Image (spheres, rainbow, N blue to C red):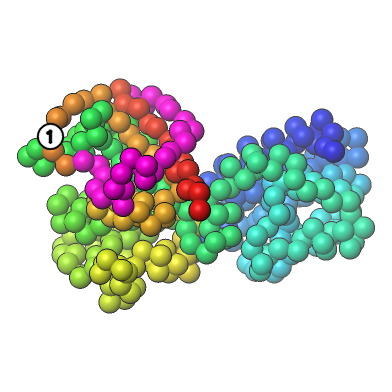
Amino acid sequence: MASGSVDEAMRRAIALAARGLGTTSPNPVVGCVLLDPDGEVVGEGFHAYAGGPHAEIVALAQAGRRARGGTAVVTLEPCDHTGRTGPCSHALLAAGVARVVIAVPDPNPVASGGAATLRAGGVDVELGVRAAEAEAGNVAWLTSMRRGWPYVVWKYAATLDGRSAAADGTSMWITSEAARIDVHALRGTVDAVIAGVGTVLADDPRLTARNLRDGTLAIRQPLRVVVDTFGRTPADARVRDGAARTWVATAAEVGTGPDGRVDLPALLAELHHRGVRAALLEGGPQLAGAFLAAGLVDRVVAYVAPKLLGAGPTALADAGVGTIADAIDLEITDVTQVGPDLRITALPRKREG
C-alpha cells in the first residue's frame, strides 16, 4: 500500500500532469515526483510538449544524485522505447531509483513495458495508486490509445429552451462573451475541431482557438475538420484561410456510411492515424445527431444561456431516439456558472446490451 508521502506525491504528480493538457498530443500528459529515501521531495516534472523531455527526465534532472535509493511517483507507466526521446525506464534504472509507483499502465504497445524492465532491474514497482484520478486527467489520450479513435467532446450552445438560433436564423450571440472565451480555451485543449458543411455554409466559422479580447490566434491550433459528403465547402470559406490546418473530409476520400454520408467511424480512425487524440465536435445539429446515434460521443459540454426563444432550430437533430425508452441518458459531472450562462458537463451512459 502507498504511504502517506507517496499518496501525496501522486496527487501532486496528477496536478503537474494537467499542466500539459493541450500541448503534448499525440503524447499523453504525465507528471512525476521524486522522493529521496527519507520521503522528501527532491524533484518533480511534467511532460510539457511533444518531443520534449518526459516528466521523469525533468524530475531526475532536478533531483540529481538525491534520486538514488529513492522513489519515483509517476502518473503513467514509464516508457520503454526510444522515439524522439530515450526510454524513461532506463533513465530511472541509471539514476539508481529503488522504487517506482505508477498510477496507470501504458496501453500503447509501442511504449509499454517499462514496469517489467524496472522489475527486471531490481526496482520495486507498485501499480494502481490513485489510478481513477490519473485516468480522469488523461482520459482523452488513454481512451484514444485503447480503442483506436479519438475521444470526442460534443460542445453546443443553446437557450434554456434548447434553441441554437432564433426563428429567423440569427444566433449571434446566444451565450455571453465569458462563455465564448471559455469555448476558445476548450478548443485549445483538443487536437481537432469538427463541424459539418451545413454550419460552414450557414455561418462561415473560423474554427480557430483565439483570444477574444484582442483577436490573436493561440500558438497551437487544432486541426479544422469539415465533414462534407459531397465536397461543397467554398474555396473562400474562412476554414480555408490558412490560420490553421484544415481537412475537408468527403465521402470520396473517407468512405460512405449506411446513411450515404461520410462514414463517421472511418473518419475518426483516420483522425487517430493523423495523431488526433481528442476532438471537439462543434456546429451542426445533424452531425451531432449522427455522432450520438452512432455512440461516438464521449462527453457533452453544453453552454446554456438564460434566454427563451420559443421557436427556431434546436441544438440537436435526429439522434436515433424514437421513444422515451431509447433516450440517451447522461451523467452530469459538473455544473459551472460562466458569466450569466451555465456550462454543464455530462457523460453519455453506456447502454446495456
Q: Is residue 340 above or below residue 213?
A: above
Residue at screen point 47% across, 53% down: 151
The amino acid pointed to by label 1 is Ala
Quadrant of the rendered image containing residue 249: bottom left
Per the rendered image, the range of residues in magenta is 314-339
Tell me, yes or no, if residue 87 can be seen here.
Answer: no
Q: Position of residue 105 (x, y in %)?
A: 71, 54
Q: Quadrant of the N terminus?
A: top right
Quadrant of the rendered image containing residue 186: top left
Q: Position of residue 339 (x, y in %)?
A: 33, 24
Q: Is residue 192 magenta?
A: no
Quadrant of the rendered image containing residue 332: top left
Label 1 sits on a secondary structure element that is loop
Q: Is residue 164 left or right of residue 16?
A: left
Closest to the observer, 237 or 287: 287
Closest to the observer, 224 or 267: 267
Q: Is residue 329 left or right of residue 237?
A: right
Q: Circle 1 is placed at which residue position?
A: 311
| Total labels drawn | 1
Residue at screen point 28% across, 61% down: 226
Residue at screen point 20% across, 70% down: 230
